């Protein structure tokens, strides 16, 4: 009996709404943490493979402009090592101190690679970046006994209105037990305190089919229950973009850069694994978008959740049937 050939790669699914309000293909940014090669060595290898113009921001922060896959930045993931990003800029002795400390800290502090907004239909290009990192000897979660490395997606919201944002958060919290199970966070992340899920009372309020607030009420409700960046799906950048003054009234000092994107944080980047791709994680995000775009199913799943008496592990099995259908 002939064996069926296994696929050598996993395709990237398209979301149900591919274009934004301007009729342009939506974009997504990707962030990934790793250790091993320095930021400078990494950006040089990316330039060699992808072309573009290299810009040194500081000794531990670099940008690659106009590459074959758009703009990329690589830097040590610690704000104190980049004095130019602090209020008032970085002048005098401080940048020199930060540079010297950064060289020492590079053995302990991970690098973060961040793409600029990339059209969703070109997301598969990011796997080329992973190949470059592996050739450089970059390491991820499976190589660090006391640290786990993050993968983040920043997908552009298809519409910037209360109905869209509400539908997305409803879908996400309903699917989150399944998402967390599928991601299988490294146990180190549990010890280090990965992002907390949304509070149960907030979840029960928003999944109700009757909950479709306007933008001001949605933001007020969100901030009352979630005055923090510490969520799997961090809405603060998007809400800051929609109503900066409303967010700042509650969180005047929180580090938030407003942008019209969701911020989906994942706890596991297995950079050195030759079989690892960001496609499965992205495709699970697409499952969130698909449920968000189906109002009838979304309301049905919300009602089912409100009547459900079991634990999250059991609920994950329930919503898996919705995802697979």
Image (spheres, rainbow, N blue to C red):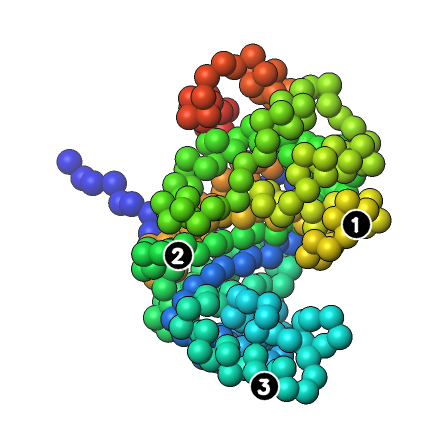
**Mark 1: few, some, or many residues within 10 Å (few <14, many ≥20)?**
few
Instruction: Note whether residue 45 is visible.
Output: no
Left/right placement of residue 315 relative to residue 118 reads left
**As drawn, is 74 to the left or to the right of 95?**
left
N-terminal-most mark, 3 or 2:
3
Q: Are marks 1 and 2 in contact (CB under 8 Å)?
A: no
Q: How crowded is mark 3: few (under 14 residues within 10 Å), some or many (20 or more)?
A: some
Q: Dot 2, how many residues are within 10 Å of its Cα: few (below 14), some (14-19), or many (20+)?
A: some
Q: What element carries label 3?
A: helix
Q: Residue at x 42, y 21 (%)?
A: 314
Name the residue rendered at 54%, 36% in the picture: 197
- Between residue 153 and residue 48, name the one nearer to us: 153
The residue under label 3 is 96
Dot 1 lies on which element?
helix
| Residue 192 or residue 241, whichever sits in front | 192
Label drawn at residue 147: 2
Q: Position of residue 93 (x, y in %)?
A: 63, 86
Query: Residue 154's spot in the image, x, y percent?
Result: 61, 52
| Mark 1 vs mark 2, CA separation in Å | 32 Å
- Confirm whether residue 220 shows in the render: yes
**CB contact under 8 Å: marks 3 and 1:** no
Say above or below: 222 vs 230.
above
Residue 272 in the image, given as x and y percentages of width and height: 34, 61
- The residue under label 1 is 248
Tell me the quarter of the picture where residue 165 sits. top right
Assign a secondary structure to mark 2: loop
Mark 1 or mark 2: whose residue is earlier in sequence: 2
């Amino acid at each position: 009996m002939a064996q069926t050939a296994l696929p050598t790669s996993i395709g990237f699914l398209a979301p149900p709404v591919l274009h934004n309000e301007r009729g342009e293909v939506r974009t997504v940014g990707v962030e990934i943490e790793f250790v091993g090669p320095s930021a400078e060595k990494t950006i040089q290898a990316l330039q060699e493979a992808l072309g573009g113009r290299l810009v040194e921001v500081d000794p531990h922060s670099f940008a690659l402009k106009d590459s074959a896959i758009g703009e990329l930045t690589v830097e040590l993931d610690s704000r104190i090592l980049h004095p130019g990003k602090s209020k008032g800029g970085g002048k005098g002795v401080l940048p020199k101190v930060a540079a010297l400390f950064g060289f020492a800290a590079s053995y302990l502090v991970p690098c973060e690679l961040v793409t600029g907004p990339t059209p969703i239909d070109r997301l598969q290009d990011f796997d080329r970046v992973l190949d470059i990192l592996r050739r450089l000897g970059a390491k991820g979660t499976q190589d660090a006994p006391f640290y786990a490395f993050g993968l983040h997606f920043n997908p552009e919201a298809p519409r910037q209105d209360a109905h869209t944002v509400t539908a997305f958060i409803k879908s996400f919290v309903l699917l989150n037990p399944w998402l967390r199970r599928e991601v299988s966070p490294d146990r180190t992340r549990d010890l280090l305190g990965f992002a907390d899920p949304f509070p149960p009372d907030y979840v029960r309020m928003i999944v109700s089919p009757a909950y479709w607030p306007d933008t001001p009420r949605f933001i007020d409700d969100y901030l009352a229950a979630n005055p923090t960046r510490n969520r799997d799906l961090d809405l603060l950048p998007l809400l800051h973009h929609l109503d900066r003054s409303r967010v700042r009234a509650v969180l005047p000092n929180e580090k938030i850069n407003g942008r019209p994107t969701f911020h989906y944080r994942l706890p596991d980047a297995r950079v050195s694994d030759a079989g690892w791709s960001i496609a499965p994680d992205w495709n699970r995000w697409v499952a969130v978008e698909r449920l968000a775009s189906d109002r009838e199913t979304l309301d049905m799943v919300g009602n089912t959740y409100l009547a459900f008496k079991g634990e999250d592990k059991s609920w994950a099995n329930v919503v898996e049937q919705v995802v697979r259908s």
